[in-house]
Image (cartoon, rainbow, N blue to C red):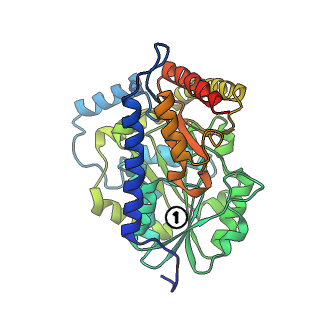
Amino acid sequence: MREGADVERPDTVIGRRLAGRALALASRTRADGLTLSADHKSIDLTRREPLPTPAHIGDAAKAALDRGETHYTSRPGVPELRAAIAERTTADGFPATTDGVVITNGGAEALYIALQSVLKPGDRALIAGPVAPNIVDMIDFIGAERVAIAATTRSPGAPDIAELSQPDASVLLVGSPSPITGVVIPPDTLREVIAVAIERGMAVILDRTLAWCAHDHALARFPDPELAAQVLTIGSFSIAWGMDGWRVGYFTAPAVHIAAMRELKQAMSICTSAVSQFAALAALENAKPWLADQRTTFSHRLATATTILAEAGIPVMQPDAWPFLLLDTRLIHPDDNQAAMMIARDAGIHVEPASRYGDTLAGYVRIRLDAPEQDLLSGLKQLVSFHNTCL
């Protein structure tokens, strides 16, 4: 690590996390003690409504059990699933072969394996855009230096090209659509960012967890397959298919990285559950009707939510993918942690302070459009009523 680098000590990081969790707990505890009017109830807009497992996915899991698929699979994963992922990833402009795909226990394991494979203690990792706290923890655990790079004013969510000139940077981590905001980096802008990073000797890790959730899938396609072949990509079945508990993620990687990443996956967890892998394969084999229905549902929910909020003068960060929506609550309180506490305490609505994902989101709170539909509508109306009292 370079001398004089401005990096938080581990005990400071842990203290900050605990303080954030304590604040969230205090917010929830205060709200739970409210006596709300008869027209109001306490509503949590940070939790998704569990989706019923689609019949064809459940049927595939049962069939796998009936066939006795209860043992270790090929270490990188079931060949049919890896081939299906390679086909879809290649169609999106990120060339992959079956041998270049590895199935993991969720997207978090895929990302950790990628980071662990391309970073070593003292390396510098550039982080483009907001990220979940567990990713910060991963980089800190590896002992690398993390540097958050600023976004360009030309394109929300896209890193400023000038920021890629950081000396000695070895890795660029970027997400499109952002797993935090759902905002897509325009394909041509993303191409420029990746090209500059690779030219400067960086490994590029692209988190495509929400690619299947894009309202317009064309935004998730990459225009330069030759360049994309040099990128490590991360994906997950959790959100698009509601398969959180099935724990199926994956990564694709170029030949220079794939051997080390496969070995690390095997050392960590040998392989992903065979039943879950065959369920994921069924999801891909019936992807079109399912994703079409999901896009219709969430496009409608997004339109409804933004209309309700716009009428009250509450700005939003327009997402390109479901299920997250960020609301600007600075008219309630400039500090989003305080705004979230006030919203919980005085309106009975639980929202998530967005600054926990990075300083660039300070002043915003985050909700999920996949909360139970009636809770979403009622919660937004209660939030709007409270917001209007703050003006």
Q: Pointer 1: what residue?
A: 254
From the viewer's perspective, is 92 left or right of 56? right
The C terminus lies in which quarter of the figure? top right
Q: Residue furthest right?
A: 154
- The residue closer to the viewer here, 145 or 189, is 145
Kindly identify the residue that appears in the image at 29 percent across and 60 percent down: 268
- The residue closer to the viewer here, 363 or 263, is 363
The percent position of residue 339, horizontal first and vertical second, equals: 55, 41
Quarter of the view holding residue 214: top right
Q: Residue furthest top?
A: 38
Kindly identify the residue that appears in the image at 57 percent across and 28 percent down: 383
- The residue closer to the viewer here, 70 or 378, is 378
Q: Is residue 87 visible?
A: no
The percent position of residue 129, horizontal first and vertical second, equals: 60, 57
Q: Residues within 10 Å of mark 1 (few under 14, many from 20)?
A: some
Q: Is residue 127 visible?
A: yes
The percent position of residue 106, horizontal first and vertical second, equals: 39, 48
Quarter of the view holding residue 296: top right
Residue type beneath disc 1: Pro
- The image shows residue 153, relative to residue 87, as above or below, that is below
From the viewer's perspective, is 372 left or right of 149? left
Kindly identify the residue that appears in the image at 47 percent across and 58 percent down: 100
The percent position of residue 174, horizontal first and vertical second, equals: 58, 58
Kindly identify the residue that appears in the image at 50 percent across and 14 percent down: 39
From the viewer's perspective, is 153 left or right of 175? right
- The image shows residue 115, relative to residue 340, as above or below, that is below
- The image shows residue 144, relative to residue 371, as above or below, that is below
From the viewer's perspective, is 233 left or right of 264? right
Q: Secondary structure at mark 1?
A: loop
- The image shows residue 108, relative to residue 283, as above or below, that is below
How many discs mark residues in the rendered view? Answer: 1
